[in-house]
Image (spheres, helix red, strand yellow):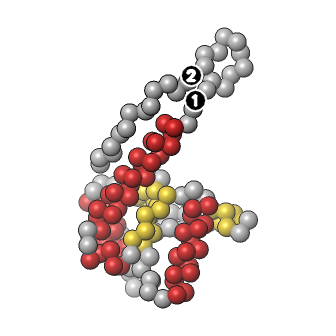
Amino acid sequence: MAYQDKLWNNYKSEGEKRIGTYLQERKINFSYERPVAVVDSGKQKLWYPDFFLDNYHVLIEYLGMNGNQESAKINDYKRGVYRANRFDVIEVYPTDFKGDWQHKIDSGIRNTLERRVRDYASKPRYGGASHSSAKTYRHVKPYRQTSFKF
């Protein structure tokens, strides 16, 4: 069964439709089930996460089949593969729709971007050239903390 939003996009579930509609309302560019390359058990494979946020390089997975042991094992496995491949993933569950699930997506994006800035700022920067005339750039002052608002 296909779930269609007001822009005629088709989704596999009502939860995915709600997420897609919210992303559209927030004007967040995304691709639905865009293939991403992962290394899984030593082999390169294509996986199709539910949402790929184009401008943020963040994935959103709607884990709608929760509640039984088999789906929990699958979700744990996917989580581990994504983590090993250094993907940032926001997980949304059916129970999240009972609360402020939009905030979960917004804060997930914001926290990911803030962490990336901290990680980048904490790495020392040195000039890579071996020429004596090359300038060496050093990270002297801490990078100003930025709060992302979108």
Whether residue 127 is visible: yes
Mark 1 touches mark 2? (CB < 8 Å): yes
Q: Is residue 113 above or below residue 32?
A: above
**In this picture, residue 79 sits left or right of residue 98:** right
Pick whichever, 85 or 125, lies toward us.
125
Q: Where is mark 2, residue-wise?
A: 137
Name the residue: 57% across, 56% down. Answer: 86
Q: Circle 2: is it few (<14), some (14-19), or many (20+) Cα within 10 Å?
A: few
Whether residue 7 is visible: no
Secondary element type, mark 2: loop
**In this picture, residue 104 sits left or right of residue 82:** left
Name the residue: 42% across, 56% down. Answer: 53
Secondary element type, mark 1: loop
> Which of the 4 image quadrants contains residue 64?
bottom left
* Mark before the other along the chain sequence, 1 or 2: 1
Which three-letter amino acid code belongs to the residue tagged 2? Tyr
Name the residue: 45% across, 26% down. Answer: 141
The residues bearing labels 1 and 2 have C-alpha atoms spaced at a distance of: 6 Å
**In this picture, residue 36 sits left or right of residue 5:** right
Q: Where is mark 1, residue-wise?
A: 125
Residue 73's spot in the image, x, y percent?
A: 56, 81
Q: Is residue 24 above or below residue 11?
A: above
Q: Is residue 44 above or below residue 75?
A: above
Residue 103's spot in the image, x, y percent?
A: 29, 62
**In this picture, residue 9 sits left or right of residue 46:** left
